[in-house]
Amino acid sequence: MKKKIAFICVHNSCRSQIAEALGDHLASDKYDFYSAGTETKPQINQDAVRLIRQLYGIDMELTQYSKTIDKIPTPDIAISMGCEVSCPFIGKAFDDNWGLPDPTGQSDAVFIEVIRQIENKIRNL
């Protein structure tokens, strides 16, 4: 049985969504990937959607949406994407904090740097 990995951030609209998409793309044979937040946004960050489609050919909006932690299975491994203010409490301690900056509102170059960091971390799971 594959372990369930959840990527957690506050709004579940950018970094955690990127990680879920790349996890499914790169390592779905080893793990089941989920993302969630303590709050939701009406849609996934459109820069993230555009760049993940451009770089990997993945359309995140086909299978992903912003959701809260209670809407996903209980994870075996919970990874915080990097909470600049305060990490949400999810009922257990985080297994890891990737400490990634939020690229929202930044240039494509900043977004791509964060995307590449997420890709490398997933490849090293």
Image (cartoon, grey):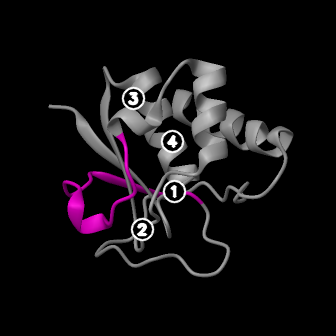
Left or right, 105 with respect to 82, comes to: right
Q: Which residues are magenta?
A: 64-81
Give the amino acid at mark 4.
Answer: Ala
Give the amino acid at mark 3.
Answer: Asp
Q: Which mark is residue 120?
A: none
Q: Secondary structure at mark 2?
A: loop
Residue positioned 63% across, 34% down in the render: 50
Give the amino acid at mark 2.
Answer: Thr
Q: Nearer the viewer, mark 2 or mark 3?
A: 2
Q: Secondary structure at mark 4?
A: helix
**Residue 33 visible in image:** yes
**Quarter of the view holding residue 3:** top left
Disc nearer the start of the sequence (4/3): 4
Q: Determine the CA span between mark 2 and mark 4.
A: 16 Å
Q: Determine the CA span between mark 4 and mark 3.
A: 8 Å
Q: Determine the CA span between mark 1 and mark 3.
A: 17 Å
Left or right, 68 with respect to 13, comes to: left
Q: Determine the CA span between mark 2 and mark 1.
A: 7 Å
Q: Which residue is mark 3?
A: 24
Disc nearer the start of the sequence (2/1): 1
Q: Which residue is mark 1?
A: 13
Q: Are marks 2 and 1 in contact (CB under 8 Å)?
A: yes
Q: Which mark is residue 19?
A: 4
Residue positioned 85% across, 38% down in the render: 109
